Amino acid sequence: MRLSIVLLITATTFLISCVTEGDKIYNSYNYFPEDSTGDNDSTGTEFVQIVSPTSNQVFEVWYDWVPYPYYQSCEWGYQADTVYFAEVTTTIEEPITEARVFVRTSPSGGFNQYSVEQFPGQEHFFVRIFNFNVQFTQNISPELDGAFWVSLTTSDSTNYISQTVPFRIESRVHYDMATVPVAPVADTLIENSYQQRMLIEWCRQSPNSDSFHVAIRRDQTGHVARVNMSTEYYGQMEYTDYLPVSDYSVWISASNEYGESAASDTMRLTTHEPLPPGDLAATTYANHDVVLSWWNRSLPDSILIGRRDTLSGWATIDALECQAPYCTGNYTDTTTVQGTVYYYRLGGSFENGVWWYADSVGVWAP
């Protein structure tokens, strides 16, 4: 990390624009009335000079690519640690008790007080005009055109002001962008318990990644599904096209116009049995049809409808095909017999097996 920088730049000096009245120099910021003693001295020569920076000088803010400073966070971003100072010289004889810096950060903006220095010095001193300090962003700060001026107050409550000095700040980075990105760090691989969702997270390690490539391999077959993610969504994704009770391996790489990074370390996961649907309910109508409703927490290839009455065992009466990521949440049984008690249950048919869920619901067909 760079240390704060004092910019000492030789510059053409500028005399202050001011009004003299006796030995007073004043402006609209702090007006002082005429000297009532009758001993007005109109030969005052006090002035304030900004030695550096020069007018319209360009400052370069250099950013590093660093980890986000919070505990247990894998985010990275740009950070700068730079302070700019103005060098001031004066011919003021009274002791200077305070220096105030007023800064404007855009051509159309107003001046706001930025810093205050108590007893800064007398003939030669420095005041802070701008700083970028522990400033984290995903993108470097935009270039800006600003300006500043300095107000000095002496022990006899006189105010002196400097000329207005415009300046420009341009952003730079300490990173070679014309290279293959660094391999991401694999961070998290879990199966969400509330629904069939595989959460994959990773940590980017370089700012020049245009996209990420996530590989999900089913270890039993060796089949690899590849998902490309733009940097707009960098850092995490959810994956749903996987099977229950199966072993999976996941790794990630990054790429840009110069090539693809090496793969991250491999993360491994064994998936759980599929979750049963929630809120299974049955409703009957006067024509003795039975309408089933539920909400899905798994994404099988198809949902199986099982039925039995009081005299027979379970039988599969229908299979409702799912179009991932959507599965229907209702079914109407029109094959009931009036005056019969029925029980219904649901099952999920996957590529690697069928799971019947324990919950069932009973109803009487009137």
Image (cartoon, grey):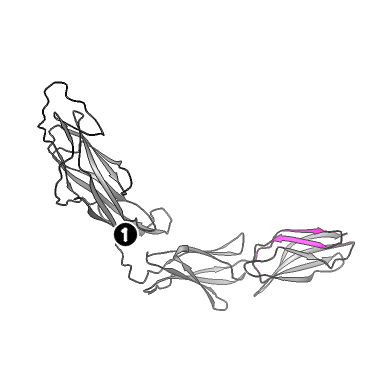
The quarter holding residue 300 reads: bottom right
- Residue lying at the far right of the rendered structure: 339
Give the percent coordinates (x, y) of residue 298.
Answer: 64, 65
Q: Closest to the observer: 44 or 206?
A: 44
Crowd class of label 1 (few under 14; some 14 to 19; many from 20; radius 10 Å): some
Give the percent coordinates (x, y) of residue 6.
Answer: 21, 50
- Can residue 81 be spotted in the picture? yes
Q: Is 236 placed left or right of 81 in the picture?
A: right
Which stretch did the figure color magenta? Answer: 272-300
Q: Closest to the observer: 363 or 155?
A: 155
In the rendered image, which quarter contains the N terminus?
bottom left
Q: Is 31 placed left or right of 212 in the picture?
A: left
Q: Is 94 placed left or right of 30 in the picture?
A: left
Secondary structure found at label 1:
strand
> Is residue 299 located in the magenta-colored stretch of the structure?
yes
Where does label 1 land, which residue?
A: 64
The quarter holding residue 357 reads: bottom right
Q: Closest to the observer: 196 or 135?
A: 135
Give the percent coordinates (x, y) of residue 343.
Answer: 81, 63
- Can residue 188 be spotted in the picture? no
Give the percent coordinates (x, y) of residue 115.
Answer: 28, 41
The quarter holding residue 356 reads: bottom right
